[in-house]
Amino acid sequence: MNFHVVILQATMIFGAIGLGGGLYEALLIDRAWPKLPQLIQPQRGGIDRKLFWIPMHTIYEFALVAALWANWQNPFARSCILAALAAHAITRAWSLLHFIPAALRFEQADDLSPPETAAAWAWTRQSRWRIVIEACAVVALVLALSGG
């Protein structure tokens, strides 16, 4: 198997793992934590989402760059990988500017007031769009692997 294909396959797998993590949070964690904020508060015995997301994003981002480099000579694969990279960059920028600061505030709060609970539910609804955008990135990588 060619090196450029292996790199692209690994990148797609990392993207799918991240997508699975997003689905896990949306389907299980986000449905409960606005009512029970301690679920996402490590200092109160809850999950520490950073333990998954920081390594996952780091590995995936390096893989995206490596896949782009390895497949640069293939115009179709290059376009697909660039689309995946753009979609991921959009979700990362949105996360850094909006979701992460809010999540850190929710993690540090004791119990949520009614306005904070409403903000938490809004956060969970908005966060679902990141899954949709990341799914587009994974589809773009699948297309790159298929060769068109």
Image (cartoon, helix red, strand yellow):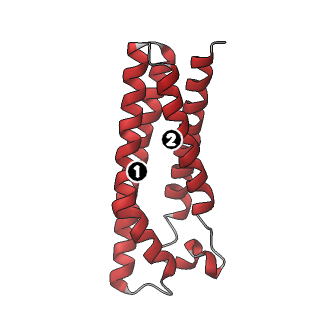
Q: Is residue 31 above or below residue 83?
A: below
The residue closer to the viewer here, 39 or 87, is: 87
Residue drawn at the location 32% of the way across and 82% of the way down: 115
Residue ranking furthest to the front: 69
Task: List x then y, in percent, for residue 25.
Answer: 53, 57
Residue 84: image location, x then y, percent? 41, 33
Q: Quadrant of the C terminus?
A: top left
The vertical placement of 111 against 142, above or below, is below
Quickly name the residue at label 2. 61
Callout 2–callout 1 Cβ contact below 8 Å: yes
- Locate residue 4, reporting x and y percent: 57, 18
Residue type, numbered disc 2: Glu
Which residue shows up at 37% across the image and 65% down it? Answer: 123
- The picture places residue 143, in percent across and down from the top left corner, at 45, 21
Residue 92 circle label: 1
Q: Element type at marker 1? A: helix
